Amino acid sequence: MGLLDNFVFSAFTSGGTDHASPIAMAAQFIQRQPGGITGLVQQLQNAGLDSVVSTWLGSGENSPIDPQQIESVIGSDRIQSIANTLGVDPQTLTQGLSQALPALVDHLSPNGQLPKEEEVAQGLQTLKNLL
């Protein structure tokens, strides 16, 4: 089992398999991002959130991210489009992302490095199959 597979398994065994769960939304969101999770992390860093993202990659406590920060970086039109695709409202999507992204990125980067995209893609496919 890969890193994301382990995280998804633990999220589902502790929180159920609700399609609108923050972890499920974050995984589907990442799958729709150019460059996947690496692209998303770079986009957040380039938008001035490097100090926030660096805590997710480090071994300490994860700094939170506001739903408004996510919307500002991603763009409201893109958030709306992805929310429509996922069948949730934009506020639910950004709120779910603000809850799940710090833990998801932290879990995927145990040594401060993000996994290879093949491993992320495999884990996201596993999640999709569970839904």
Image (spheres, rainbow, N blue to C red):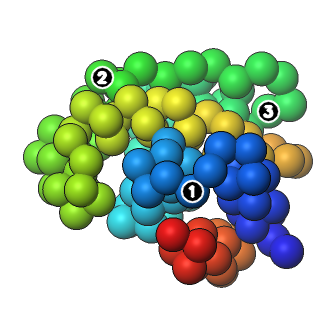
Q: Nearer the viewer, mark 2 or mark 3?
A: 2
Q: Which residue is mark 1?
A: 17
Q: SS class of the residue under badge 1?
A: loop
Q: Position of residue 93 (x, y in %)?
A: 33, 41
Query: Which percent across, then down, holds residue 36?
Result: 49, 64
Q: Is residue 62 left or right of residue 34?
A: right
Q: In the image, residue 23 lies at what x, y percent? A: 55, 48
Mark 2 vs 1: CB contact within 8 A: no
**Local crowd at mark 1 within 10 Å, few (<14), some, or many (≥20)?**
some
Label 3: which secondary element = loop
> To which residue does mark 3 refer?
58
Q: Disc 2 or disc 1, which is closer to the eye?
A: 1
Residue beneath disc 2: 68
Mark 2 near mark 3, Cβ–Cβ under 8 Å?
no
Considering only vertical position in the picture, is 11 above or below 62? below
Q: Quadrant of residue 75?
A: top left
Q: Of the numbered discs in the image, which one, if any, rests on residue 48?
A: none
| Residue drawn where x is 75% and y is 53% of the image | 13
Q: Which element type, helix, strand or loop, lies under badge 2?
A: helix
Q: Residues within 10 Å of mark 3 (few under 14, many from 20)?
A: some
Image point 22% across, 39% down: which residue?
90
Q: Residues within 10 Å of mark 2 (few under 14, many from 20)?
A: some
Locate residue 86 relative to residue 58 in the image: left or right.
left
Disc 2 marks a residue whose amino acid type is Gln
The amino acid type found where label 1 is placed reads: Thr
Q: Disc 1 and disc 3: Cα gap in Å?
A: 28 Å
Disc 3 residue type (three-letter): Gly
For the residues labelled 1 and 3, say whether their Cβ atoms are less than 8 Å apart: no
- Side of 101 where 15 appears, left or right: right
Residue visible at 49% across and 46% down in the picture: 21
Which of the two discs, 1 and 3, sits closer to the camera?
A: 1
